[in-house]
Each structure stands twice: as structure tokens, then as C-alpha cells.
Image (tube, rainbow, N blue to C red):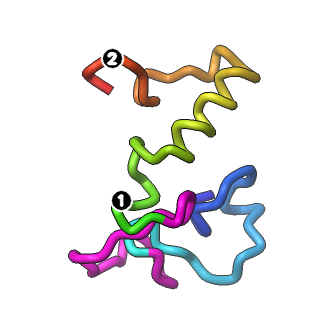
């Protein structure tokens, strides 16, 4: 969800009242974030990367789950063993 950065729903179905920033975790849209020295991953509760980081272990697990259920969902920008991803 691009509103709360959660999984298993999309923004228009989101029940959260306020946006959650994918970069710092604050209560604002990611596009208006002015934080340059703080990162926060909503998915794995890590301070080492942002929620949009494709290297996040939770993101990789969710990609694997989707590919397992729907092999056609495999897209080239999902992390793979290839160096270019």
C-alpha cells in the first residue's frame, strides 16, 4: 500500500487515516519528506534502509510468495541473482 506502506491491500482500500512516509516513517507523504538523515523500513522495522528498498528481506519474501502463487508475476525489477537487479 502506497499510503501506509503495509502489505496485502492497496491505497484506496487502506484503513489508515494518515499517510506514512516510505523513507522516514513519519506521518506525511513520501513525496513531501524533507528528512535526509533518517531511514525507517515499515516492513521489517529496520533503521538501516527505507521501506522502498528492494533489498529488504520482507520485500524479497513477499516477491517470492507472489511468484510462487503466480509465476507470470515475475518482473525484471524484482531482486534476482542477476547483478543488474
Spot occupied by residue 18 in the image (x, y as percentages of width and height): 62, 82
- The residue positioned 52% from the left and 66% from the top of the image is 45
Q: In which quarter of the image is residue 71?
A: top right
Q: Which residues, given as a range, are shown in magenta? A: 25-45
Q: Relative to 32, is 37 on the left or the right?
A: left
| Furthest residue toward left | 36
Crowd class of label 1 (few under 14; some 14 to 19; many from 20; radius 10 Å): many
Q: Is residue 34 magenta?
A: yes
- The residue positioned 38% from the left and 68% from the top of the image is 47
Mark 2 lies on residue: 82
Query: Does residue 7 lie above or below 14 as drawn?
Result: above
Spot occupied by residue 70 in the image (x, y as percentages of width and height): 72, 20
Crowd class of label 2 (few under 14; some 14 to 19; many from 20; radius 10 Å): few
Q: In which quarter of the image is residue 72?
A: top right
Of the numbered discs in the image, which one, if any, rests on residue 49? 1
Q: Does the magenta stretch include residue 58?
A: no
Q: Quadrant of the C terminus?
A: top left
- Examine the residues drawn in magenta and state their main secondary structure: loop
Alpha carbons under labels 1 and 2: distance apart: 21 Å
Spot occupied by residue 36 in the image (x, y as percentages of width and height): 22, 75
Query: Does residue 53 lie above or below 15 as drawn?
Result: above
Amino acid at each position: 500500500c502506497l499510503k501506509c506502506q503495509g502489505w496485502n491491500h492497496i491505497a484506496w482500500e487502506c484503513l489508515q487515516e494518515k499517510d506514512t512516509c516510505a523513507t522516514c516513517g513519519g506521518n506525511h507523504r513520501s513525496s513531501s519528506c524533507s528528512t535526509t538523515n533518517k531511514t525507517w523500513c515499515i516492513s521489517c522495522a529496520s533503521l538501516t534502509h527505507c521501506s522502498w528498498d528492494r533489498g529488504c528481506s520482507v520485500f524479497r519474501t513477499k516477491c517470492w510468495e507472489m511468484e510462487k502463487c503466480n509465476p507470470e508475476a515475475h518482473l525484471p525489477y524484482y531482486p534476482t541473482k542477476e547483478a543488474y537487479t
